[in-house]
Structure formats: structure tokens, C-alpha cells
Image (cartoon, grey):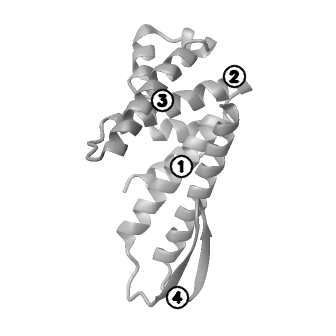
Amino acid sequence: RWQESVIDGCVLSRYLFLVMFFFFFFSSRRRHTRYISVTGVQTCALPISCNFAHVDHSSVMLLTRAACETYLTFFYIFAAPDDTEQQKYRYKAWELAGLIDRQKFYVSSKKGAEIQKEEAIRIEMLKNEIQQFEEFRNLSEKERKMIFGGKWRLRNSWVDLAKIADINEKYFRNIYGF
């Protein structure tokens, strides 16, 4: 299962790259007239042939926020921890939060309902695994409930995570506060 977390780390970094690519795309006034191959789960070619009369600042800021959150998530889970155990704990707390969020989705298909049931089982497995970590055992009862409620950052705001990543707070607030 730990190898899957490394793969998720790669997915986060690829997502960050794509967000930055689209950031460049939406913030540029230059004419883009070539096909660009974007590799993800599948490879697809994006036909880019448009000339922007203006820069869409809302899209740029949205993509900036997405890039910031992706980078800070990656840093908090994979770079900031002191050891591998802390990485594993943070990764599992983050994975748990994502699964808990998805349990709130309305499903309209039989396949979707099956996936939700499978994920509910995974949630219980993750809770059992998380309880084995010393970092979790050192939390207060309230903080443990927060983790099991899907609050993987606990009380950390995005600004707090930026400080952990050694990003200047004033600069981060300026670019993130749109």
C-alpha cells in the first residue's frame, strides 16, 4: 500500500504540472497553434489554436490556488515529515479524507453504489491502520475525531502549510487570497 502512496505523489506532481501548464495557457496572450501531448492515465492531444483578446484573471487565480494547494499537500505529506512513518501516517489521513468526501456524493448508478460500498470498507480499514501510528496516538481525542472526520490538516490552514513549506506568508496570502 505504501508504494501506492508514492504513485499518488507522482499523480499530485503531474497534476501540479498540468495546472501550471494551463496557468501559462490562460495567462498568455500569445497565439498557440500546435498540438500538445498531455500524458496522464491516457495520452491525448489538445488542439490549441486560439488568440485571446484578454487574460482571464479569474481562471488564472483559480489555477494558482489549485497549484498552491497541490504543492502544499505534496510538501506536507511527502517532504515535510521527519521520517517515513510520519509520511505514511499523513498519507493515510489524506487518503481517508478523500474517501470520506466521496461518500457524500450522490450516486445514480449501480456501479457508483458498488464503488461507494467498497470505499466505505476501505475507510474502516484506514481508520484501523491510522490508529496504529504513534503520531495519531499522541493526538487529543478532539484531534483524533477531526482526523476520522476527514480533516487531514487538523487545524492547519493553507497559510499554515505554506509556512511549513517555508513560503513567505505575506507573499502566499497575496497570491492565494483571490
Residue that carries the numbered disc 1 in the rendered image = 70
Residue 33, placed above or below residue 67: below
Q: Is residue 35 left or right of residue 123?
A: right
The label shown at residue 148 is none
- The numbered mark, 4 or 1, whose residue comes first in the sequence reads 4
Q: Nearer the viewer, residue 44 or 130?
A: 44
Residue at mark 3 to residue at mark 4: CA–CA distance: 42 Å
Q: Nearer the viewer, residue 60 or 4?
A: 4
**Secondary structure beneath label 3:** helix
Tag 3: amino acid: Leu
Residue kind at label 2, given as amino acid type: Glu
| Alpha carbon separation for disc pair 4 and 1 | 27 Å
According to the picture, the residue beneath numbered tag 4 turns out to be 30
Say which amino acid is labelled 1.
Thr
| Distance Cα–Cα, label 2 vs label 4 | 47 Å
Foreground mark, 3 or 1? 3
State which quadrant residue 162 falls in. top right
- Reading the chain from its start, which is encountered first: label 2 or label 4? 4
Residue located farthest toward the right when viewing the structure as drawn: 83
Q: CA distance from mark 2 to mark 1?
A: 21 Å
Pointer 3 residue = 96
Q: Earlier in the sequence, mark 3 or mark 4?
A: 4
Q: CA distance from mark 3 to mark 1?
A: 17 Å
Foreground label between 3 and 4:
3
| Residue on which disc 2 sits | 85
**From where the camera sits, is residue 175 visible?**
no
Which amino acid, mark 4? Arg
Which comes sooner in the sequence, label 2 or label 1?
1
Element type at marker 1?
helix
Of marks 2 and 4, the one in the foreground: 2
